[in-house]
Image (cartoon, rainbow, N blue to C red):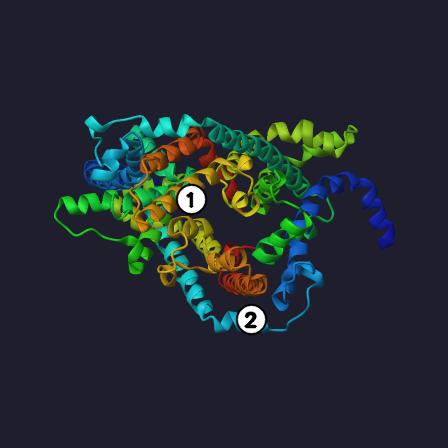
Amino acid sequence: MGRGEYLVKNLKRHWMLLLMLLPALIYVIVFSYIPMTGIVMAFKKYQYNGGIYSSPWNGLSNFKALFISGKLLQVTRNTLLYNVAFIFFGVVFEMGSAILLNEIINKLFKKTVQSLMFLPYFISWVVAGAIIYNVFNYERGVFNNIVTSFGGTPFDLYNTPGAWPFVLIFLKLWKQTGYGSVVYLAAITGMDQEMFEAASIDGASAWQKIKYLTIPSLRPTMMILVLLGIGNIFRGDFGLFYQTVKSSALLQPMTDVIDTYVFRLLIDNGNVGVSAAAGLYQSVLCFITIMVCNKLVKKANPDYALY
Amino acid sequence: MSAETISLTEGTIIEEQKLSDKTVIRKKKKMSSDQLSVNIVGALLVGIFALICVIPFYLIIVASFTSENSLIRDGYPILPRLSELSLQSYALCLKNPTAILKAYGMTIGVTVTGTFLAVLFATMTGYVLSRKDFPWRNQFSFFFFFTTLFNGGLVPWYLMCTRYLNFKNSIIGLILPLMFSVWNMIIAKSFMAGIPAEISESAKIDGANDITIFAKLILPLSKPLIATLSLFSALAYWNDWYNCMLFVTNEDMFTLQYYLQRILGSAEAMRIVAEKSGIALPSIPLEGMKMAMTIIATGPIVLLYPFVQRYFVKGLTIGAVKG
C-alpha cells in the first residue's frame, strides 16, 4: 500500500475525529499561531492604519529604546527573584502543610483547617487587592491600628518599596498554599502504607518517618512542580502585581515585573513597538529556559522530564 | 536443604515474629507519645496558617458593617464596634442596584456560556487525542502543546483581538480568551486515556460514529472529569477582570470583578482629589462602600466553595497524572 493510499484510507476512517479536532485547531491557530507571526511588530514602527503586517519596518530601534530605558534589567531581575522566592517558599509551605495535615488525627479539625486554607484560592486578585488595602492603608489600615495602639509609629507601605517583596511573597503563599498542598497530600495518601508500618516496627519515631520516608517519597512530585515553576520563571503573575501595587511609580523598582512593564507600555503608553519588543524578549527567554531545563532533567532522570 | 534446617529456620522466624510482636506492643506506647507531639505541632502550625487565611475575610466583613464615621475616625476595625454597627455601606451599594445587577447578570452569563464551551472544547479535543487508533495523535498533541512553550507575547495577541476580531465592547471578548486551555485538554486526555479502549472499539464495530461514541458513551463515563473542568473554568470566568479591563469600556458590560476594581480605584481617586484640593471629604461613605462591594462581589463564590472544594481536590489528583 502506498503512502498516499494509506493517507486516504486513514482520512476516510478518521474524518470525524478530525472534525472534532477542528474547533480547537482553529482556536490555537487564531489565538496562538497567527499572533506568533505578529512578533514582527517588534521590528516595526506601529501605525494604526498599517496594523501588524503593513506598518513600516524600523530595524532594531524598538530594542534600542528598550535597552536605553534601563528598565529591562530591573524588570527581568524582579521577575526572576520573585519567582525564585515563590518556587522555594511554595515548596516549603505546600509540602510542609501537606505533611503536617497528614499527621493530624482529628478528622474534623483536619477537614476544617484544609477548607479554610483553600479559601483564598477562590477569590480574584481584585479582592486580594481590597484586602491589602484594608490591612495596610496608611491612615485607617488594620495593621497601623494595631501598631499605633501599642504606641508605635504608623507604617506607610505605599512609601516603602523595600517592604513589598515580603508583602507580595506572603500574599502569593497565602493564596496558593491550600491549593498547592492538595497535590502533595494526594501523593502522601498514595504512598505504600506498609513502608510506614515496617518503619514503626523497626522503631522509627514519627519525626524520623517524616524525615526519612515521607519527604524523600515526595521528591518526584516536588521535582515536577519545581520544573513547571522554573519553566515559567520569566513570567510574572500579572494579577498579583497589578492589583496590589496599582500604578505607583515609587514602588516600581521593587515591584515591576516583565508582564506589568509590557502591559504598561502597550495600554498606558500606547508604545506598541517597544512593548512588542519586550514581549518577544520575554517569550524567547521563557522558551530557552524551558528547553534547557527539560534537556538537563532528561539527562539526569528521564522520568522527571516534562515532555 | 534438609528437613532439619527448614524446621530450624521456621523456628527462628517464629521466634522473631514473637519478638517483633513484643516490640510492636512496646513501640506502640512510645509511638503514641511522639505521634502526639507531631500531631500537636502540626495542628498548631496549620491551625495558625488557616487562621491567617480567613482573618482578612473577617476583617472585610466587619468593616463593611461599620459606619463610615467610625471607619474615618478610628480606622478599619479589628473587633466589631458594637455601637457603630451599620448597614449604611450596603444601603449605599444597593441604592442604585442596576449597575450591580447588570454586572451580576453579565458575569453569570459569561460564566455559564464560557464554562459550557470550555468543557466541550477540552473534552472533545482530549478525547480525539486519547484515541490510540488515531494516527496523527502525537503530531496534533505537539501542535497544541507547543503553544505553551512559545507565544508571541501580549502585543500581537492584543492586536489580533482588538483589530482583527473586534473584541472591543463585545461579549465574545469576555468568553473566547479563556475558552480553550491546553492544560485542561491534557487533563481531559489523560483522564480519557484511562477509559478502556474497547468501549470505543466495540461501539465502532456496532456501527456508531465517533461523535456518537463521544457524546453517548465517553462523556457519561467522564463525570468526575467534567465536574472538575467545569469548576476550574467557572472559577476562571467568575474571577476574570483582565479581559474586561482590556476590551470593555461600556459600563453596561462590566463584569463583577472589574466593577469592583473600578469601585476600589475610583473611590480612591475621588478621595485623592478631595484631599489634594483641600475640599472636605465628600459625605459619600467611600470606605465602607469599598468593603461592602468586595463582599457583594465575593459572596457567591465563598458561599459555594465548601460544596465544590472536594471536586477541586479530586480534579487536582486527576490533573496530577502526567499528560
Image quadrant assignment for residue B151: bottom right
Q: SS for tag 2?
A: helix
First-in-chain label (2 vs 1): 2
Q: Amino acid at mark 1?
A: Trp
Task: Name the chain letter of the residue that bears numbered label 2.
Answer: A
Q: Are marks 2 and 1 in contact (CB under 8 Å)?
A: no
**Is A70 on the left-hand or right-hand side of A208?**
right
Image coordinates of residue B101 in percent, x first then y, are: 49, 28
Would you name the residue on which mark 1 appears?
A: A125
Task: Name the chain letter of the residue that bears numbered label 1.
Answer: A
Q: Mark 1, residues whose alpha carbon is within 10 Å: few (<14), some, or many (≥20)?
A: many
Marker count (numbered): 2
Q: Give the camera-side residue of A142 and B34.
A: A142
**Is A93 on the left-hand or right-hand side of B297?**
left
Residue B261 in sight here? yes
Q: CA distance from mark 2 to mark 1?
A: 32 Å
Would you name the residue on which mark 2 appears?
A: A63
Q: Give the camera-side residue of A274 and A92.
A: A274
Residue B23 in sight here? no
Q: Is residue A261 above or below residue A102?
A: below
Q: Give the camera-side residue of A221 and B239.
A: B239
